[in-house]
Amino acid sequence: MLEEVVDLAAVTVLAVLEQAYFSLQVIYARRKYSVSPPTTTGPPEFERIFRAQANCVEYFPIFITILWTSGVFFSHGLSSVCGLLYLYGRLLYFRGYSQSSQGRLAPLYFSAQVLWVLIGFSSLGVFLSFCRVYLNVDLLQQLSCALGLV
Amino acid sequence: MLEEVVDLAAVTVLAVLEQAYFSLQVIYARRKYSVSPPTTTGPPEFERIFRAQANCVEYFPIFITILWTSGVFFSHGLSSVCGLLYLYGRLLYFRGYSQSSQGRLAPLYFSAQVLWVLIGFSSLGVFLSFCRVYLNVDLLQQLSCALGLV
Amino acid sequence: MLEEVVDLAAVTVLAVLEQAYFSLQVIYARRKYSVSPPTTTGPPEFERIFRAQANCVEYFPIFITILWTSGVFFSHGLSSVCGLLYLYGRLLYFRGYSQSSQGRLAPLYFSAQVLWVLIGFSSLGVFLSFCRVYLNVDLLQQLSCALGLV
């Protein structure tokens, strides 16, 4: 079981490292633009970096939750690939938003789409398991039979 | 093992979908009240929706964590029912807060109470497992014996 | 399997209780300094408590994620001890920040260091599992052989 999800665990560690990188950028921006805690407002350059990190923080638990649900109930390989794409999208988002409000949009849409794919995988995987456990119906097998594959 | 927790996974997917719905409401509110990122302040109507979503985001990881701890170490059925109640409470909270500051209170108390029930389940489940593993004492069985049930 | 991670589950329940404590402090501070939701700005005393809790909330999912990755793929005992240290550091951080902006620094650095230790454990554990599963190489065993321990 554990061996099967080592790819999900690797994506998880990468996600944590990415969050650590974003947090460090906010600390550097606080120093550069002289915005001491607890203040969270300042020049637009600082506020964009602050909000970029806040937005990534906000989506981190949703991403981890859906990555593992999708990985465990649907496919750990496909979910890990989506996970890597999401993390790459988030990196582009952070860099884009740091430069301009406009620059955040394209990578934000991209990472949102990847998240929807993971939500789709999770829903499908959980739905199929649900049918198997509670209705005693194996939809995948029935589909194979109906298509004459088995 | 996986089959046993498919109900927790279903609640988890619902929770993610609910968060996605709240996020979309903030995007609509940003358009409606013309509050462009990175700004997070504006008319009270916007700020209430923004804070409602921020509060739900804040509690999302706590909810998921305690849902699974309670589900795995105490009872997955009871925890899933509590999970559904919590998500329903959060929906009422979001709608109530969108309308008025006062409107958030009743559903906020309700969802907090459900969370405390889940925390109670988790604590009890983990405590009993702890006694079994580290003290080699099965409290549930001893209780049954003491009550003459076994 | 479940029996092995009961210490991680105990740390998790403690972490949730600590977050509940921080949330209650914000509610008390809102009453004390008359800052009604959705407002999040006010006297510096209130803003420090608000930001202290927001910062702990921000790190909660990262902490839980890395605690379990490290606990499952490296060592549940060592990870639980680190988890307890982290939670203690966060308590000192919250209390320090409530009193002064300066007071948050030492415990913040301490809890960040503990988090880096957990990230190191996770990375190492996942890397070793990765080599075993995908490259069919057991680095730990090879190391033992090289050192003449086996």
Image (cartoon, coloured by chain):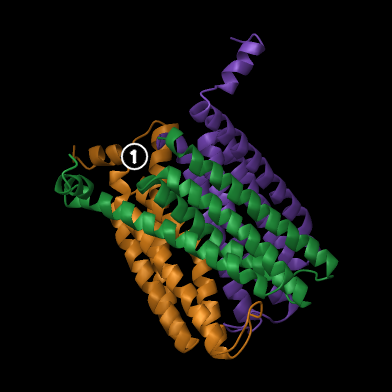
Chain colours: A green, B orange, C purple
Q: Chain of mark 1?
A: B
Side (left or right) of B63 relative to C150: left
Q: Is residue A71 among the parts visible in the rendering?
A: yes
Of the pair C12 and A45, the residue shown nearer to us: A45
Quarter of the image with the C terminus of chain A is top left
What is the x, y in percent for residue C31?
A: 60, 80
Q: Which residue is mark 1?
A: B139
- Measured from the top left, where is residue A90 in percent x and y? 60, 59
**Residue in the image at 51% along x and 79% along y:** B26
Q: Please name whichever residue, B60 or A118, is drawn nearer the observer in this view of the structure.
A: A118
Please, what is the three-letter code of the amino acid marked with disc 1? Leu
- Percent x, y of residue C8: 50, 42
Residue B75 in the image: above or below residue C81: below
> In this view, which residue lies farthest toward the front?
A148
For the residue pair A63 and A106, the one nearer the viewer reads as A106
Residue that appears at 62% across and 34% down: C124
